[in-house]
C-alpha cells in the first residue's frame, strides 16, 4: 500500500497529476484530429480554381468541427456542399468525416443525376453506417445540408437542401430557396425523397450557403439569437463588397454580437460570386 | 387458435425440419417431388394431435420421433378449457407474451408417447419447479444423514454429562457431610480463636458446596437440552428413515411398473397375433398384465404422495417444528404443490384448447345413385356412399328424421328448396361446363320401392342425380372427376359446417389428382371459402392448386442433396426458395407458364423477360401505368431460358420483343442473341431487344425509398442497388416480387404511391417497350 502511494506521488510530480496528464493527452489528440479534419476540407487552391471569387467564414466552436464544406467538379458541373452535422466537437467531426467520404463516393463514382437523388443516396449511406432502422435506443444523428450543382454552360443551378436553405442576391433582392424539412439521416416518422430545385443564375449573382451557427448565436444587449432576418439584411448590406471584406465584416459582426457569451455552435458561411 | 409453426424430428425421412412457419392466411401448400417427405409432414402433424404412430414411422437409427407444434392464440383466447388454478405461476403470461403456445409430443420405441408443454420460457418455469423439488430431496437426504450422526454425538454428550453430574452429586454429598460436622464443631467450640478458624473454614466449604451445586444445576439443564435435541433428531432420523424407504420403494415400484408396462404391450401384441385357440389364454394374460399395471400405477401414485409429504415433514422437523405442526404444514404444502400440473399434465390440459387435426387421404365415399333411408337411420356406414350422403344431408342442414314427415306436400317442397340451395352453392365452386352452355346441378328426391323390389316394397330411399340442361344422369353415369369433386366438396363443406364453432386443421394429401386443371382451380376456391373456419395444409404437385400471387403459402420439401447426410428431408419456406432445386419448385415454374396459351396471341404485345421476379414486377408496374394494357410479359426460367423462348415464339409466329436488365449475367447472353438472331441488334433502330440500361435488375426500377417502403417493408440504409441488397442478404426475389404483385392485384395500390424517381424509371422502360412494338407492328403492316 505504502509502495503504491509513493509511486503515485512520484508519477504526479513527473506528469503533473493524473487529470492534467489525461487532459493534455486529449488536447493533443484533438489538435491532431483538427489538423486531419482541415486536411479533408477543400484547399484554397481548389476553391480558387472552381469558384474564383469566394469567401469562407469557418469558426469551429472547438478544435474539431461538425460543420464542413466540400466542392468538386464532374462532367463540367460544379458541386458545392455546406453541411452541419448533429452536435459539434468530436461527435460532429466524426459525422463530418463520414459525410465527406460518402459525398466523394456518391458524386465522384456514382450515377445519381439530380441534387435530390444525391441527398437520397447520402441518407442511405448515413442510415446504413449508423445502423438506423427507426428503433428506439439507436443513433438519430444526421446532417443538415445544402447542395448546389452549377452548370455554367446552361447558366443554371440545381439545389437540394436538408433543413438548410440557399440565398441568392441579385439586384439588391435576396432570393431564398426553401429546403426540405428533414435531415440527411433517419427521420422522425418516415423518409421522403429530397426535392431538386432548378434555378437560373446570372452574372454577378452572389450565392450564400451556411450552417445555422451564425443565426443561432446568442449575444447582443438582450442576450438573444442573432436570427435570420438580421443575417439576411447583413448579407444584403455587404454583398457588393469584396469577398475578403465580406468575410471580415461577418466575422467582426458575429464576434461583436457574441461579446462575452460563449459560442454556441460551429459557424460556417460560404459566399461566392457568379462571374 | 391456429397452427403457426411446426418442427418435426426423427419422423420417417425427416431428421430435423427446424421450425417452419405456416401461412398466416390459413392455407399452406407443401410442394416437392415424390418421396420428398410431404406426406410425412401431414402424417406427423396428424400424429401429434392423436398421439398415434405406426412402427414404420420409426427411423432405423433408433432416434425417437418428436413433433412440436406452435399455435398462435387468438387475441380473445382465454384458455377456458384449461384449469388455470392448477398451472404453475407465469405460464399463461409466458404464452401471451410470446403469443405462442408450444406443445411437443415425443414417442418411445414401444410407440408410447408423452406430450408436454414446451417453449423456452415455459421450460424455464417447469425446470425451476423441478429443481426446487430436487433441491428439497437433496436437503432432506443430507439432513437425514446429519441427524443420524448427530444422535450418536448427543447420546455421547448425554452420557458424559450424566456421569459428570453423578460425580458432582457425590462430591456435593461429601461436602454436605463435612459442612454438617463443621457446624456441629463450631456450636460446641468455646475457644474464640478456634471458633473464628472454624467459621472461616465453614465459609470456604460452603462456597465450594454452592459452586458444586451450581455446576450440578447447569449440568442438569444441559442434560435436559441435550435430551430435547436428541428427541428432535430422533424424530428427524425416524421420519427421515421412513422417507428414504419411501423414496427407494418409489424407485423400485417405478422400475417394476416399467417392466409390467412392457409385459402389457407384449401381451397386447401376442393377443393380436395369436390364433383363435391361443387367443383365450392371451386374453387372460392381457387382463392380468392390465391389473398388475393398474395396481402398480396406484401404488406408485400413493408412494409419490407419501414421499412428497414426508420430505416436507422432515424439512419442517429440521427447522424445529413439533411433530404435529410439521406434519400439518407438510400435508397442506404438498396438497397445494401436487395440485400444480407437471409439464406433461399441462400439455394434456392445453391439448383441450387446440384445434382438431383431420387427415384426409382420399375422398373415396362417392355419392351413390340411391341409398335406403333405413340405412341412414341405422347409421349403417358400410353401405356404399353412406359418408357422401351423410355429408350431403349435413350441408343441406337436414336431420334424417325429417323424412319421417307424413305430409307429402311439405316433404316435396322442402326437397325442392334444398336442391336449389345445394346446387347454387356447388355451382359457385364448380366452374366447368359439361360440354354445354349450362352448368351441372345436384338433385335428390325421396322415393319408395315398388313391386320391382318385392323384398323392400314400400320402403323409402333417397335417389340422387346430377343433371344438366338436357340430361338427367345418376352419379355413377358421370365422370370420376365430377364425382370426386362432388365428394370432396361434400366432405369439406360438411366438415366446416359441423365444426363451425370449433377451429380445425385439415391435412389433405394431394387433393384433386384426377381432376381437370380447371377443376383443380375450383378446389382452391373451396379452400378459400372455408379458410376462415378451417386451416388447410395440403400437398400437391399441381400448379393449378397454387395461387401464383400467394407464394408465401408454399413450403418446398426436398431430400438433401448432400451425400454425407442421410437422405434427409429439408423444408424451405418461400423466403428461401432460392436454395431449393428447380425440380422441387416445378409447380411454381409450371404455374407461370400455365396461363401462357391463354395470354399469348397474335393480338397481344408479348415481351419475354428473364425470370419470374421480373415477370411479377413488370406485369404489375405496367398495369399501374396502363390498366388497359395488352402487354403480356412472358417469364423465362432464368437467362438460359430466354433463347429457348425466343425460338418458340418465332416458331409459333408470334410478335414479341425481349426485355433484359443490364447486369453481368445478361451481358454474355445479349452478345449471343445479337450475334445469332436477326432483329435483335441493339445498335439497330428497329431492334426487338430492349436493354434496361443502368438497371441491374427489375427491383432497381424502384427508388431506394420505394423499394424499402413497398417491397421489403423495412426502414434501414441501403447504400447499394436494390438488387445488390437482395443478393447480399440472400432474400427470395420471387417472394418479394409476388407480394408486390399481390398488393397491386388488390387494387389498393396506385401509381401515386410511388415517388418521382420510380415513376420516371418505369416510364422510361415502358417507353422503350412501346417503341419496340410500334416498330414491330409497323413492320407487320
Image: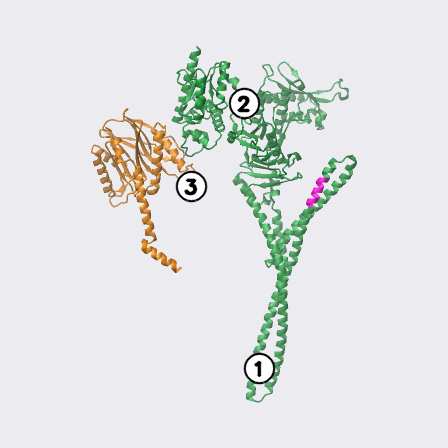
Chain colours: A orange, B green
Disc 1, disc 3: CB below 8 Å?
A: no
The quadrant in which residue B45 appears is: top right
Q: Nearer the viewer, residue B511 or A10?
A: A10
CA neighbours of label 1 inside 10 A, class few (<14), some (14 to 19), many (20+): some
Q: Nearer the viewer, residue A14 or A244?
A: A14
**Image coords of residue B132 (percent x, y):** 58, 50
Say which chain tag 2 marks: B
Give the distance between the C-alpha atoms of the residues marked 1 and 2, in whole angstroms. Answer: 125 Å
Circle nearer the viewer, 1 or 3: 3
| First in residue order: circle 1 vs circle 2 | 1
Q: Which residue is mark 2?
A: B590
Residue drawn at x 75%, y 41% is B285
Question: In this view, which residue lies farthest toward the right?
Answer: B277
Q: Verify whether residue A220 appears in magenta.
A: no
Q: Which residue is mark 1?
A: B202
Give the distance between the C-alpha atoms of the residues marked 1 and 3, in whole angstroms. Answer: 91 Å
Q: Looking at the figure, which quarter contains the C terminus of chain B? A: top left
Residue drawn at x 31%, y 49% is A24
Q: Are marks 1 and 2 on the same chain?
A: yes
CA neighbours of label 2 inside 10 A, class few (<14), some (14 to 19), many (20+): some
Secondary structure under tag 1 reads: helix
Question: In this view, which residue lies farthest toward the bottom?
Answer: B191
Q: Which residue is mark 3?
A: A137
Give the distance between the C-alpha atoms of the residues marked 2 and 3, in whole angstroms. Answer: 47 Å
Amino acid at each position: 500500500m505504502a509502495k503504491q502511494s509513493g509511486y503515485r506521488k512520484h508519477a504526479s510530480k513527473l506528469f503533473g497529476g493524473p487529470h492534467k496528464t489525461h487532459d493534455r493527452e486529449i488536447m493533443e489528440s484533438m489538435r491532431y484530429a483538427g489538423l486531419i479534419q482541415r486536411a479533408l476540407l477543400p484547399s484554397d487552391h481548389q476553391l480558387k480554381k472552381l469558384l474564383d471569387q469566394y469567401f469562407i467564414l469557418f469558426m469551429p466552436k472547438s478544435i474539431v468541427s461538425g460543420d464542413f464544406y466540400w466542392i468538386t467538379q464532374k462532367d463540367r458541373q460544379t458541386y458545392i456542399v455546406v453541411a452541419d452535422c448533429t452536435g459539434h466537437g468530436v461527435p460532429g467531426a466524426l459525422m463530418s468525416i463520414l459525410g465527406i467520404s460518402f459525398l466523394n463516393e456518391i458524386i465522384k463514382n456514382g450515377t445519381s443525376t439530380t441534387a435530390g437523388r444525391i441527398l437520397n443516396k447520402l441518407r442511405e449511406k448515413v442510415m446504413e453506417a449508423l445502423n438506423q432502422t427507426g428503433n428506439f435506443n439507436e443513433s438519430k444523428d444526421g446532417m443538415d445540408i445544402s447542395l448546389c450543382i452549377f452548370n455554367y454552360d446552361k447558366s443554371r443551378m440545381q439545389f437540394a437542401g436538408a433543413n438548410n436553405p440557399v440565398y441568392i442576391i441579385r439586384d439588391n433582392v435576396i432570393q431564398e430557396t426553401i429546403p426540405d424539412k428533414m435531415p440527411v439521416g433517419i427521420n422522425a416518422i418516415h423518409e421522403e425523397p429530397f426535392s431538386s430545385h432548378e434555378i437560373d443564375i446570372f452574372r454577378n449573382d452572389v450565392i450564400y450557403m451556411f450552417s445555422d451557427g451564425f443565426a443561432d448565436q446568442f449575444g447582443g444587449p438582450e442576450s438573444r439569437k442573432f436570427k435570420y432576418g438580421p443575417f439576411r439584411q447583413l448579407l444584403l448590406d455587404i454583398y457588393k463588397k469584396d469577398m475578403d471584406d465580406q468575410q471580415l465584416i461577418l466575422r467582426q459582426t458575429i464576434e461583436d454580437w457574441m461579446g462575452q457569451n460563449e459560442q454556441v455552435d460551429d459557424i460556417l458561411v460560404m459566399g461566392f460570386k457568379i462571374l | 387458435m391456429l397452427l403457426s409453426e411446426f418442427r418435426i424430428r426423427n419422423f420417417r425421412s425427416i431428421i430435423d425440419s427446424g421450425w417452419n412457419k405456416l401461412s398466416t392466411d390459413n392455407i399452406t401448400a407443401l410442394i416437392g417431388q415424390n418421396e420428398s417427405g410431404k406426406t410425412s409432414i401431414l402424417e406427423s402433424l396428424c400424429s401429434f394431435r392423436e398421439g398415434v404412430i405406426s412402427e414404420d414411422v420409426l427411423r432405423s437409427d433408433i432416434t425417437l420421433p418428436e413433433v412440436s407444434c406452435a399455435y398462435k392464440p387468438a387475441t380473445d383466447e382465454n384458455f377456458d378449457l384449461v384449469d388455470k388454478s392448477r398451472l404453475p405461476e407465469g405460464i399463461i403470461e409466458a404464452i401471451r407474451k410470446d403469443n405462442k403456445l408450444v406443445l411437443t409430443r415425443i414417442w418411445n420405441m414401444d410407440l408410447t408417447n408423452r406430450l408436454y408443454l414446451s417453449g423456452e420460457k415455459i421450460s424455464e418455469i417447469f425446470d425451476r419447479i423441478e429443481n426446487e423439488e430436487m433441491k428439497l430431496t437433496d436437503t432432506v437426504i443430507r439432513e437425514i444423514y446429519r441427524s443420524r450422526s448427530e444422535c450418536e454425538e448427543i447420546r455421547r454428550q448425554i452420557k458424559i454429562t450424566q456421569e459428570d453430574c453423578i460425580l458432582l452429586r457425590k462430591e456435593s454429598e461429601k461436602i454436605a457431610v463435612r459442612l454438617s460436622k463443621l457446624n456441629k464443631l463450631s456450636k460446641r467450640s468455646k475457644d474464640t480463636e478456634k471458633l473464628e478458624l472454624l467459621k472461616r473454614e465453614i465459609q470456604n466449604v460452603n462456597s465450594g458446596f454452592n459452586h458444586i451445586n451450581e455446576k450440578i444445576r447447569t449440568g442438569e439443564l444441559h442434560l435436559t437440552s441435550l435430551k430435547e435435541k436428541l428427541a428432535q433428531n430422533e424424530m428427524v432420523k425416524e421420519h427421515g428413515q421412513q422417507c428414504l424407504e419411501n423414496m427407494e420403494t418409489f424407485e423400485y415400484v417405478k422400475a417394476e411398473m416399467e417392466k409390467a408396462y412392457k409385459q402389457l404391450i407384449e401381451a397386447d401384441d401376442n393377443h393380436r397375433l395369436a390364433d383363435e385357440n391361443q387367443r383365450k389364454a392371451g386374453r387372460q394374460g392381457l387382463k392380468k398384465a392390465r391389473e398388475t399395471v393398474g395396481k402398480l400405477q396406484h401404488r406408485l401414485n400413493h408412494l409419490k404422495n407419501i414421499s412428497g409429504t414426508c420430505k416436507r415433514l422432515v424439512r419442517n422437523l429440521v427447522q424445529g417444528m413439533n411433530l404435529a405442526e410439521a406434519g400439518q404444514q407438510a400435508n397442506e404444502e404438498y396438497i397445494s404443490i401436487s395440485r400444480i400440473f407437471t409439464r406433461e399434465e399441462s400439455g394434456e390440459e392445453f391439448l383441450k384448447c387446440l384445434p382438431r387435426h383431420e387427415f384426409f387421404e382420399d375422398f373415396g365415399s362417392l355419392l351413390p345413385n340411391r341409398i335406403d333411408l333405413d340405412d341412414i337411420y341405422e347409421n349403417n356406414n358400410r353401405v356404399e356412399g353412406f359418408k357422401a350422403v351423410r355429408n350431403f344431408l349435413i350441408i343441406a342442414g337436414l336431420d334424417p328424421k325429417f323424412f319421417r314427415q307424413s305430409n307429402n306436400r311439405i316433404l316435396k317442397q322442402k326437397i325442392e328448396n334444398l336442391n336449389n340451395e345445394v346446387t347454387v352453392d356447388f355451382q359457385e365452386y364448380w366452374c366447368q361446363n359439361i360440354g354445354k352452355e349450362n352448368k351441372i346441378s345436384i338433385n335428390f328426391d325421396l322415393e319408395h320401392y315398388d313391386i320391382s323390389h318385392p323384398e323392400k316394397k314400400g320402403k323409402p330411399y333417397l335417389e340422387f342425380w346430377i343433371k344438366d340442361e338436357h340430361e338427367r344422369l345418376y352419379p355413377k353415369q358421370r365422370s370420376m372427376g365430377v364425382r370426386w369433386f362432388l365428394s370432396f366438396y361434400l366432405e369439406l363443406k360438411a366438415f366446416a359446417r359441423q365444426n363451425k364453432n370449433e377451429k380445425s386443421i385439415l391435412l389433405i394429401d394431394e387433393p384433386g389428382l384426377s381432376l381437370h386443371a380447371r377443376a383443380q382451380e375450383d378446389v382452391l376456391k373451396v379452400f378459400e371459402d372455408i379458410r376462415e373456419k378451417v386451416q388447410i395444409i395440403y400437398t400437391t404437385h399441381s400448379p393449378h392448386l397454387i395461387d401464383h400471387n400467394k407464394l408465401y403459402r408454399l413450403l418446398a420439401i426436398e431430400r438433401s442433396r448432400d451425400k454425407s447426410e442421410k437422405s434427409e428431408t429439408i423444408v424451405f419456406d418461400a423466403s428461401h426458395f432460392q436454395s431449393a432445386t428447380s425440380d422441387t419448385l416445378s409447380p411454381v415454374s409450371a404455374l407461370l407458364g400455365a396461363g401462357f396459351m391463354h395470354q399469348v396471341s397474335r393480338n397481344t404485345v408479348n415481351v419475354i423477360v428473364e425470370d419470374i421476379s421480373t415477370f411479377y414486377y413488370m406485369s404489375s408496374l405496367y398495369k399501374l401505368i396502363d390498366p388497359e394494357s395488352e402487354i403480356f410479359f412472358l417469364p423465362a426460367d432464368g437467362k438460359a431460358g430466354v433463347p429457348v423462348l425466343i425460338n418458340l415464339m418465332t416458331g409459333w409466329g408470334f410478335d414479341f420483343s425481349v426485355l433484359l436488365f443490364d447486369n453481368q449475367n445478361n451481358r454474355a447472353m445479349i452478345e449471343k442473341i445479337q450475334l445469332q438472331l436477326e432483329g435483335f441488334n441493339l445498335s439497330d433502330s428497329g431492334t426487338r431487344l430492349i436493354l434496361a440500361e443502368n438497371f441491374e435488375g427489375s427491383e432497381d426500377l424502384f427508388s431506394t425509398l420505394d423499394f424499402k417502403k413497398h417491397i421489403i417493408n423495412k426502414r434501414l440504409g441501403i447504400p447499394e442497388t436494390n438488387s445488390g441488397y437482395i443478393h447480399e442478404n440472400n432474400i427470395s426475389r420471387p417472394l418479394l416480387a409476388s407480394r408486390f404483385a399481390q398488393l397491386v392485384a388488390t387494387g389498393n395500390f396506385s401509381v401515386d404511391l410511388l415517388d418521382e424517381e420510380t415513376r420516371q424509371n418505369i416510364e422510361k422502360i415502358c417507353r422503350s417497350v412501346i417503341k419496340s412494338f410500334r416498330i414491330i407492328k409497323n413492320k407487320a403492316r
